[in-house]
Image (spheres, coloured by chain):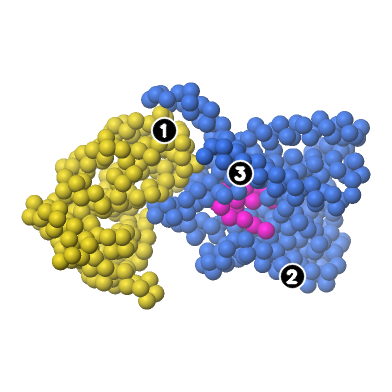
Amino acid sequence: MPAADTKTLSLKDGTVSFRKARGALRIESLIVLAILVVAMSFASPYFFTVANIFNIVLATSTIGILALGATFVIGSAGIDLSLGSILAFAGVIGALVAAKLGLPWWLAVPACLLAGALAGWINGLVITFGRVPAFVATLGMMGVARGIALLITDGQAIFGLPNALIWLGQGRPFGIPVPAIVFILAAIILHLVLSFTRFGRHTLVIGDNERGARAMGVPVRALRIKIYTLSGVMAGLAGLMTMARVNAGDPTAGMNAELAAITAAIIGGTNLFGGRATILGTVIGALIMGVLQNGLNLLAIPAFWQQISIGMVLVVAVWFDQLAKQDKE
Amino acid sequence: MTGMLQLRDIKKHFGPVEVLRGVSFDIAAGECVALVGDNGAGKSTLMKIITGVYQASAGEVILGDRNITGTAPGDIRQLGIEMIYQNLELASQQDVTANIFLGREPTRTVMGLKTGIIDFKSARKQAEEMIRQLGARLPSIDIQVGHLSGGQQQSVAIARALTFSPKVVIMDEPTAALAVREIQHVLDLIKELKGRGIAVILISHRLTDVFEVADRIVALRQGVVIADEPTAKTTMQKVVAHIVGAQ
């Protein structure tokens, strides 16, 4: 879809400069969100209750945290299909540390993040030094991380987490769920990173023109490894939040979570082929996914339909994007 | 004149395919050397070895009195060798400033510590200044490069190459995609660069351009230098004969 600055292009064609709207926030995604919210509030009397808004916020947080990492990966013209599996792997590791090994509860936090970072780092190494396409490398990690999570737990969820840890998933300081606070903080930090640092700039540049970036001296390999590691850390963070929320290290957690996360990033305006991404767009995309999921729950539509609808939203979003591109050419 | 940039017996093979079979030539400060040759003669490969994008299989690249063989692309640019690629190698979804400073974004120092935070103000100011100096006409430097015309995009690529006072500028087919008026701009620019003591390597199929600006013509065929002559002592017919191998 057209970026915000195409309209202004025809307005001014002199030497006078103007500030373009940075990035590619899609007004379309905001409209979709508004339509969804209005439709849901008519469809269900429970939609606008405080309890339900918390539900939406919680659903959005997990998808959103994953989608933030996915934004960097897809912005760099990569893909990470292992997000859901890393989420489960990290959650299981965290639960092991807190509930089984008798270590201080807070060690579960770095344990989850490190587990995610390790998986993401391996993705990055395989993709850059192994020259394995991201699609294949992360599909492999999807199997491996999930498999390890099942293996070390023997397929059973780990219960008995300390209360302090559960607070991370269920606590509500000032009435705001902790996962929502974590998501918002992560979004703010990653927004600053994407918009204002060389790392963020180079992420989009290698998504735009990798060969050119390399010729201009951008350390493409090191950068890609960092991007996939970041994606893994975010999946680890989502794993921590999920574990704390459901009070268990569940090796089957986050099944197909990458589908929702990638969809959130794409409908938030991230270019599937790289080079364009905004965190604000992804946050809106995650909200759309959260409202959609929640709405389907409220309307008592079977969970299987959620999969179907999310899958369709993803394909339709990319299809529209391609249509808009054809119009331009 | 001693060479500012010297190529010593450069060889390059991709698997069993020998692309460069021992190429040597020098280029002096303020000199323009045209590199001519048919497609597949090895011109682009040779240039990518100079810029560090490819590693030479054998041979040396010497800048001044320093052996820079095998140096990474970013460090090569730091040392003052810039290349304007035929396809420009711009990031089309980034604005003009971002492209001009691509890989060398100025960063801010916070409390005495270097950070990775881009100094947008200073980058934008310098980019504006560079575009003004070049006399390039752009609607705005805040525009995505992909929205500019081919000639304007090339101005951006040229600005990127010249912003950090290079010693050597390599241009790969800089006039191939341009309108007549724009071609003259590029040729005038090459003359100006020579006047400022910058060495220019020009790769071009347009022999009229080559004869207008080059001091020397190096012809490459099948990975070897088959002619290296001052422009004044050769003719277009001879050069064509060298390129196609009709001698």
Give me the residue at 62% from left, 56% from top: A79
Q: Position of residue A180 (x, y in %)?
A: 75, 42
Q: Could you tell me if the residues under marks 1 and 3 are in contact, i.e. CB atoms within 8 Å?
A: no
Give me the residue at 26% from left, 68% from top: B222
Q: Secondary structure at mark 3?
A: helix
**Which residue is farthest left?**
B233
Q: Residues within 10 Å of mark 3 (few under 14, many from 20)?
A: some
Residue A326, quarter of the rendered image = top right
Q: Which residue is mark 3?
A: A322
Which residue type carries mark 3?
Answer: Gln
In front: B237, or A285? B237
Q: Are marks 2 and 1 on the same chain?
A: no
Q: Is residue B160 magenta?
A: no
Q: Is residue A121 visible?
A: no
Question: What's the colour of chain B in the image?
Answer: yellow
Residue B182, above or below A88: above
Q: Is residue A73 magenta?
A: yes
Residue A145, above or below B99: below
Q: Position of residue A86 (x, y in %)?
A: 71, 61
Which residue type carries mark 2?
Answer: Ile
**Span highlighted in magenta in the image:** A65-81
Q: Which mark is residue B141?
A: 1
Total numbered labels? 3
Q: Could you tell me if the residues under marks 2 and 1 are in contact, i.e. CB atoms within 8 Å?
A: no
Q: Position of residue A306 (x, y in %)?
A: 82, 49
Which residue type carries mark 1?
Answer: Ile
In front: A245, or A256? A256
Question: What's the colour of chain A in the image?
Answer: blue
Residue A16, above or below A241: above
Residue B36, quarter of the rendered image = bottom left
